[in-house]
Amino acid sequence: MPMQMKERMMTLYTELQAKNNLKRSEILSDNQVTYSEEYKCYKCRDMTFILIDNEAVPCECRQVRQAEEILKKSGISEEFRNKRFNNFNYTIENQVYEAYKEAYMYTKNFKSLEKERCNSIMFMGQVGAGKSHLSLAIANELMEDGVGVVYMSYREVITRLKQNIMDEVYYHRVMGKYKNARVLLIDDLFKGKVTESDINIMFELLNFRYFNKLPVIVSCEMDVDRILSVDEAIGSRLVEMCKCVEVKWKKLNYRMYGK
Ligand SMILES: [Zn+2]
């Protein structure tokens, strides 16, 4: 292991140890110590690292803990956890099969594409075509592979952000979560009436992710031309970032935008 990596792990270990001691002393002062519940993992005392010959080594529980953490932070409900590739409803003759293949390939190639300009995917098409299902199938698969995905229901989040636009702390906390997620899933982009402030908020978010080459998975009822007519700056960035896939049940032209 490179020296720098060793040092970083040691620093992390020390930090976690300090935090852990703090937690422990809080519990002790409360006089409510229940030893059986104190730690999830006794081997590392929940620090997810153990010391071997004065070197911090990841504990065997670390991966499980990280997976739990990823799930907790994703905001993906139990119901959405069940949207998988193997329960996506399609027939081979239908256009929707092409979208399914694109989604599957995107997932398989994710890690090699992550740092590229075109590292994202957008599903477009009518209600009920399976856009959200495919987006969530990707998210669930990525999370199992240790990639953090954060779910954002466009309409819900934008409404809450606007209600709290004067609350700077809230606004920056929520925006920060969506800006900095390793992968952001935007469900039903531009659903409903789109106002000037909706556009401003989405531009702030997508522009940040665009410049930092952070991937998005988007589902949207509009096609690319329609998105561009809503806002050209947002639309053009999305086209550059995303493989754009139409999800249609009818036998219509399968068109692919972008690369
Ligand atoms: Zn452990």
Image (cartoon, rainbow, N blue to C red):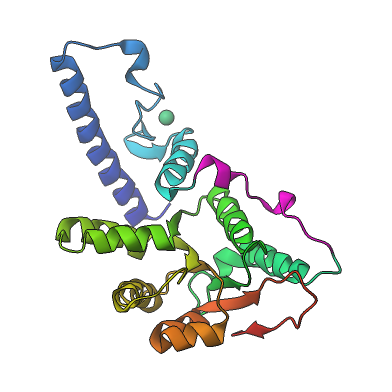
Q: Which residue is situated farthest in the left direction here? A: 29
In the depicted view, which residue is nearer to us: 70 or 203? 203
Number of numbered tags placed on the structure image: 0
Does residue 228 lie above or below 153 as drawn? below
Q: In x, y percent, where is residue 43?
A: 41, 24
Q: Which residues are magenta?
A: 77-91
Q: Residue at x 39, y 75 (%)?
A: 194
Residue 253 percent coordinates (x, y): 75, 83
Of 38 and 180, the residue lying toward us: 180
* Relative to 181, residue 13 above or below: above
Could you tell me residue 40's position as x and y percent? 40, 24
Q: Is residue 95 left or right of residue 37?
A: right
Q: Is residue 113 left or right of residue 151?
A: right
Q: Position of residue 241 (x, y in %)?
A: 50, 79
Q: Quadrant of ligand 1?
A: top left
As drawn, the residue found furthest toward the front would be 193
Foreground of the two, 59 or 204:
204
Write the residue at 17% across / 29% down: 22
The answer to whether residue 182 shows anywhere in this view is no
For the question of whether residue 220 can be seen, the reply is: yes
Query: Residue 4 vs residue 232: left or right?
Result: left
Query: Residue 207, located in which quarter of the rendered image?
Result: bottom left
Asked whether 90 falls inside the magenta stretch, the response is yes
Give the residue displayed 63% in from the left and 49% down from the top: 83
| Quadrant in which the C terminus is drawn | bottom right
Up the image or down, 191 lies above or below 33; here it is: below
